[in-house]
């Protein structure tokens, strides 16, 4: 994996894994790993784990590590990872990492070429009720021929919800949902973004759903954008928020009292949406983040003379239509929001973005 930590003064380890540093090693597979991953590796089915720094390394074991190593392991165990399959990164949640390690080393799913199970799937997921907020077991069905994900409540033949793969997005949001396997599914319904929150007790099952939805999205994208290179489609399969969290906002005249809201920033779609509560089904409003060429800008700090809220750091987003004033809990948070917003504004808008901006603006003014 790509999670590496400080390691110096251990020449043989540095020689083996130049440029990347890991504190732990699986001496069964012959790879260097981080502390977090070492916990998953340390099982009878995957192998033995040693600390590079603290454990004693016999000559034979060092030779074994030299003969294997991360690059060779990658060639072997990741030889046939399907293009849609999500490979976790350093900042991803534990369940994605755990299931990736198990799929790779325990079940050896990617070592040989085979047909990866995609297509129809049926099973139950615990789904948070839109109004009563309780998690209830619901039957979910994905139909490849219809490109629809459906879920059912009491009536087994008429779906309660129908989610088009075309506008579907999925991401793990364990902290927000309150379950380590919590998945957030979003889609567009009546031009609003609808959020669904689900989980499955079994980590393998929720990650399987996630990758199945990714496979469905990948197939859809290939059909919708023929001739587009695979590498350009992959980042569009699913998206994660670049940042999410509480801020306060005031109204259009900047005299309205500040209200605390939950914000999700989707950099790819150039949208900052806000909610009364983090797990609301629909947003209360939002800001489309265009580009500097189109007159968008973001500035650090609050306008002079503004009636302060309890948070006194913030920033202003300027759009061609109005200025939005936000306050943040602390300067760290403010910095993070600013950094991502500036990145989006400096990115030119595509034709698609311009269409989205027009639609978004029309809906905001209704
Ligand atoms: C998305 O972000 C959340 C919260 O930061 C994280 O837990 C999750 O693993 C990320 N990745 C995916 C693919 O959902």
Image (cartoon, rainbow, N blue to C red):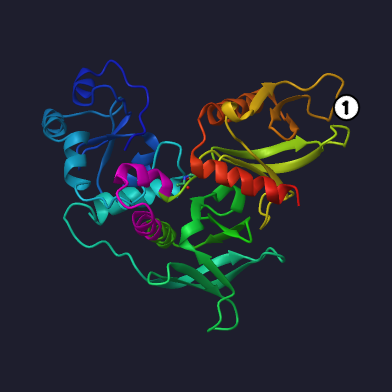
Res 69 quadrant in image:
top left
43 to the left or right of 270: left
Residue identified by numbered label 1: 307
42 to the left or right of 286: left
Res 279 quadrant in image:
bottom right
At numbered mark 1, what does the secondary structure look like: helix, strand or loop? loop
Q: Position of residue 213 (x, y in %)?
A: 42, 59
- Look at 21% across and 38% down and name the residue there: 27
Q: Position of residue 308 (x, y in %)?
A: 85, 26
Figure check: 148 above or below 95: below
Work out whether residue 172 or residue 258 is closer to the camera in this orientation and state it.
Answer: 258
* Magenta highlight on residue 75: no
Work out whether residue 213 or residue 179 is closer to the camera in this orientation and state it.
Answer: 213
* Part of the protein shown in magenta: 215-236
Figure check: 13 above or below 214: above
* Magenta highlight on residue 233: yes
- Look at 69% across and 63% down and name the residue there: 133
Does the magenta stretch mainly form a helix, a strand or a loop?
A: helix
Quadrant location of the N terminus in the rendered image: top left
């Amino acid at each position: 994996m790509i999670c590496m930590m400080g390691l110096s003064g251990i020449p043989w380890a540095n020689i083996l894994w130049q440029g990347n540093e890991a504190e732990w090693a699986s001496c069964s597979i012959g790879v260097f790993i981080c502390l977090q991953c070492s916990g998953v590796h340390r099982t009878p089915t995957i192998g033995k784990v040693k600390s590079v720094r603290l454990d004693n390394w016999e000559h034979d074991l060092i030779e074994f590590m030299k003969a294997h190593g991360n690059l060779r392991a990658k060639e072997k165990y990741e030889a046939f990872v399907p293009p849609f399959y999500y490979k976790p990164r350093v900042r991803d949640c534990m369940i994605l990492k755990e299931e990736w390690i198990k799929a790779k080393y325990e079940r050896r799913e990617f070592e040989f070429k085979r047909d990866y199970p995609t297509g129809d799937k049926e099973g139950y997921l615990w789904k948070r009720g839109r109004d009563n907020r309780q998690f209830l077991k619901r039957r979910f069905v994905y139909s490849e021929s219809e490109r629809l994900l459906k879920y059912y409540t009491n009536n087994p033949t008429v779906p309660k919800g129908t989610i088009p793969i075309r506008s579907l997005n999925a991401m793990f949001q364990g902290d927000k949902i309150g379950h380590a396997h919590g998945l957030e599914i979003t889609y567009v319904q009546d031009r609003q973004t609808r959020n669904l929150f689900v989980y499955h007790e079994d980590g393998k099952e929720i990650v399987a759903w996630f990758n199945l939805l990714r496979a469905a999205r990948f197939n859809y994208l290939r059909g919708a954008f023929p001739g587009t290179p695979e590498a350009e489609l992959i980042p569009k399969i699913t998206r994660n928020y670049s940042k999410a969290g509480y801020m306060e906002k005031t109204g259009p005249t900047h005299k309205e009292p500040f209200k605390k809201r939950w914000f999700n920033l989707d950099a790819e779609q150039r949208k900052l949406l806000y909610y009364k509560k983090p797990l609301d089904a629909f947003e209360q409003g939002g800001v489309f983040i265009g580009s500097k060429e189109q007159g968008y800008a973001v500035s650090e700090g609050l306008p002079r003379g503004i009636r302060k809220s309890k948070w006194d750091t913030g920033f202003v987003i300027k759009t061609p239509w109005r200025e939005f004033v936000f306050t943040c809990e602390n300067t760290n948070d403010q910095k993070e929001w600013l950094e991502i917003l500036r990145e989006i504004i400096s990115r030119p808008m595509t034709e698609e973005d311009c269409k989205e901006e027009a639609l978004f603006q029309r809906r905001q003014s209704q």
